[in-house]
Amino acid sequence: MITCINLGKSLSLLLDAATEIQMDPEPTEQDKAFLTRQLVQVTLPHSSPGNVPIWKRRNGNLTLSIRPGWNHEKDQPIGYPFGSIPRLLLFWITTEALRTQSRKLELGESLAGFMRDIGLDPSTGGGKRGDGRRLQNQMERLFRATISLEMMDTKDKNVIGKRWIDMQVAPEGELWWNFKNPGQATLFGSWIELGEKFYEAIIASPVPLDKRALRALKRSPLALDLYAWATYKTYSLNHHKKVEQFIPWHAFMAQLGAEYNDHKNFKKKAKAAFKKVRSVYPGLEMEEVDGGFIIRQGKTAIRQKQSRRKLSTKISG
DNA sequence: TCATTCCTCTGACCCGCCCA
DNA sequence: TGGGCGGGTCAGAGGAATGA
């Protein structure tokens, strides 16, 4: 009985979002979100990488690596950001940085308001399993981490040079929230200041997304990644007037599912996640073929005509 | 209201079947 | 025989219900 109710809730969230998006494909200004192109092409871990000194993911010539921040009190690493919450935080950070055109982002006077803003539920209490504690933990992991992007320049398969950028996500900030009591307003507003390099990177090439879809997919980090990737890829094909592109499963796994040890498992999970993505992104044109899938030109999650004003000079490749 | 408990979801791993 | 595929189980993380 409980199983039926829970399945129903989870499914109905997706179905509600799918119906809403089909009825009204263009989101309101409030329902628009953004994520930087580099973090669409190479993504954060889906699950905890464990106690390793550095975490890396590679897509062609582009490598993303993350080094966790240091907890001086406990004299140990804070840990890596992983799962859905840091992804929701990155959507929020990119969207706010673009909206305000400022490195300093106001998080608000109440944790509950911020949680609702990024798609979490403040009514889950302040216990260790509540959204508040999870958010606190993942905020610390994400904000204190150092993200590095490295681009290899090659000619005839030989490396002729490389460029890199090391970015601290938020080297400064103040959090005055009561994580045990998310609804409690505080005397001072909480804020973070994004690292200069990180700020420049995220506003340079934003990919527009639909918050309604993000809310419906928030339980699956893989589905969130695939949704952002599919939106970016469709935009890219349209922009370059390329009709379609074949994506081999092995290359796709290296890009978005590198931590999967079993490529069969990745394919199985990716196919299931794509089903969810297509329900909230009806404009996605893709077809499975031998060894991979073909993605074609189609409608982007946000109408290109509107978003292009901001993006035409910013998105490339 | 908050913290805990229970259940679901997701990723890892294994196994067996099928086909070339 | 090896690769592709689907199904099952297990552990950890996430979501929802419940009792103090």
Image (tube, coloured by chain):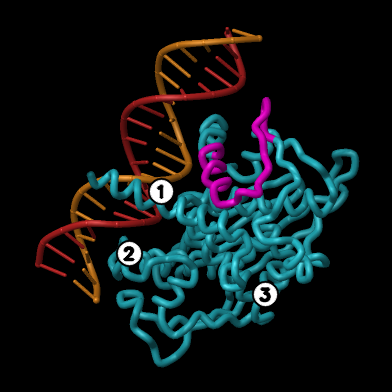
Chain colours: A cyan, B orange, C red
In the picture, measured across the screen, residue A167 lies left or right of residue A152, that is left
> Is residue A233 at least partly visible in the picture?
no
**Residue that label 1 marks:** A11
A118 versus A101 height, above or below: above
Q: Are marks 1 and 2 on the same chain?
A: yes
The circle on residue A111 is none
Between A26 and A216, the one nearer to me in the picture: A26
Q: Which residue is drawn at 32% across and 69% down?
A: A123
Q: Mark 3 lies on which chain?
A: A
Earlier residue among tags 3 and 1: 1
Q: Which residue is drawn at 75% across and 68% down?
A: A204
> Is residue A67 at least partly visible in the picture?
yes
- Which amino acid lies under the numbered mark 1 shown in the image of this protein? Leu
Q: Residue furthest bottom?
A: A187
Q: Which chain carries label 1?
A: A
- In percent of width and height, residue A230 lies at 66, 49
- In percent of width and height, residue A249 lies at 65, 34
Between A120 and A14, the one nearer to me in the picture: A14
Tags 2 and 3 touching, CB below 8 Å: no
Earlier residue among tags 1 and 2: 1
**Residue that label 3 marks:** A98
Tags 3 and 1 touching, CB below 8 Å: no
**Residue that label 2 marks:** A130
Magenta-drawn segment? A270-293
Q: Do labels 2 and 3 share a chain?
A: yes
Residue A287 on the magenta segment:
yes
A142 versus A289 height, above or below: below
Between A301 and A263, the one nearer to me in the picture: A301
- In percent of width and height, residue A280 lies at 55, 52
Label total for image: 3
